[in-house]
Image (cartoon, helix red, strand yellow):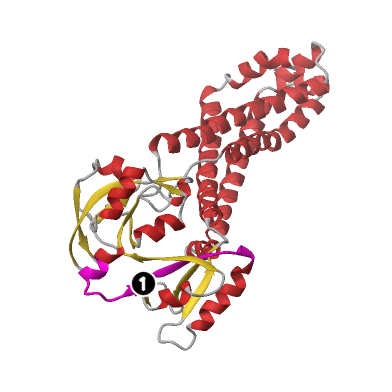
Amino acid sequence: MIKLLPLVWANLRRNMRRSILTMLSVALALFLFGTLRSVITTLDGYTAVGSEARLVVRNKISLVFPLPMSYLERIRGMDGVTSVTWQNWFGGTYIDERNFFSRFAVDPESFLAMYPELSVPADQKAAFLADRTGALVGPKLIRKYGWKMGQQVSMEGTIYPGDWKFTVRGMYTPSDPSLGEDVFYFHYDYLDEGIGRAGLVGTYVVALADPDQAAAMSQKIDALFENSSAASKTETEKAFQAGFIGMWGNISFLLSMIGSAVFFAILLVAANTMMMAARERTREMGVLKTLGFDDRTVFGLVLTEAMLLTGLGGILGIGGAKALFVLTKFDAGGMLPGFGVEWSTVITGLAIALGLGLLSGLVPAYQASRLSVVQALRKVA
């Protein structure tokens, strides 16, 4: 069959416009497949980086309602708790509302100790800890806005109104891109002082001595504040991340349905192309059989043609998606940090492309192989 590849290639070039359009249709389908599947794998990646050894404590009513700072010592004093940190979502606008990135007020020392996944050079870490207005920022923010160490950055508060000034003191490097490369961290004390020492916390993060006790410790923490004015809801960091992603709705099902619809549409296009190509070459099939080509060889020629056409489209589509998102560092404006087409998606996409060629080529290949010489040569006139 290898020796017959030039013949297969010549057949594809017979009607270049149709072959190119079909190949581009398959490429577009595989590009969409790679993109949609990568959204799902990226979202799944967020829950994977969440720890089972860390608990997130938030207000039971909603994440937008805070918890009192007075809860800190009560949680810290519980058996099985090794450390506690806390953070507040800040909101805010930097120059333009379209410049979206996550901004958190954190307790610097306990936060960095809680998250060794965030690597910070020793000198920058010391500068960040020492400066009340200091900020620790992700590498993407450095690249995007051209910030330098020691530069002052002003933001207009939204949740906490006012003109807030920060000084860039350090850049963290995440061990996993899913952790986000565009987060802006600053001192909780600076925020708390600016709003009049309100003593309010968005969430507490609790490190456990024994991860196997996560469920029991969650119940104990919630029981501790059950009758307070701000009841809590505690869950593992992994479950918290999964719940946050769940706010998007059943996006996996939706994207899967879209991908399936596109796949079957392109399958029909490819099958129609191969049927037309086989009908146009009825006489050629008769000549080939007259020259000694058996049914199996003719079947293989037509099937290989279909698989080569869709395979090339698959390489163009899924390979293009892989290259494009790597080169552009696409992350949906910070909504999908760590977004990229995984190699498992590339392999799956290529397998789908070849499967598409197999399915679309089976019927015309079978018909061509069963065609008798007399029937085929009857078309000569």
- In magenta, the rendered stretch is 191-212
Q: Secondary structure at mark 1?
A: strand
- The residue positioned 21% from the left and 45% from the top of the image is 150
Indicate the quadrant containing the C terminus: top left, top right, bottom left or bottom right: top right
Residue 218 part of the magenta segment: no
Q: Is residue 193 above or below residue 19?
A: below
Tell me: 343 left or right of 139: right
Where residue 253 sits: x, y (%)? Answer: 58, 58
Whether residue 79 is visible to the viewer of this picture, yes or no, is yes
Q: Residue furthest bottom?
A: 227
Residue at label 1? 201
Whether residue 159 is visible to the viewer of this picture, yes or no, is no
Q: Kindly indicate the quadrant of the structure image that contains residue 359.
A: top right
Q: Quadrant of residue 314?
A: top right
The residue under the point 57% across, 78% down is 219
Residue 106 lies, in percent from the top left, at: 35, 62
Compared across the picture, whether 164 is left or right of 102 comes to left
Query: At which x and y percent is residue 76?
Result: 46, 72
Task: In this rendered view, identify the residue nearer to me: 64 or 8.
Answer: 64
Residue closest to the far left: 163
Name the residue located 53 percent from the left edge and 51 percent from the top edge: 45
Q: Nearer the viewer, residue 147 or 277?
A: 147
Residue type at numbered disc 1: Val
* Residue drawn where x is 44% and y is 38% of the image: 325
Work out whether residue 184 or residue 15 is closer to the camera in this orientation and state it.
184
Residue 50, placed above or below residue 2: below
Q: Is residue 37 left or right of residue 140?
A: right
With 292 as the anchor, is 306 left or right in this view? left
The quadrant where residue 192 appears: bottom left
Tell me the quarter of the image containing the N terminus. Answer: top right
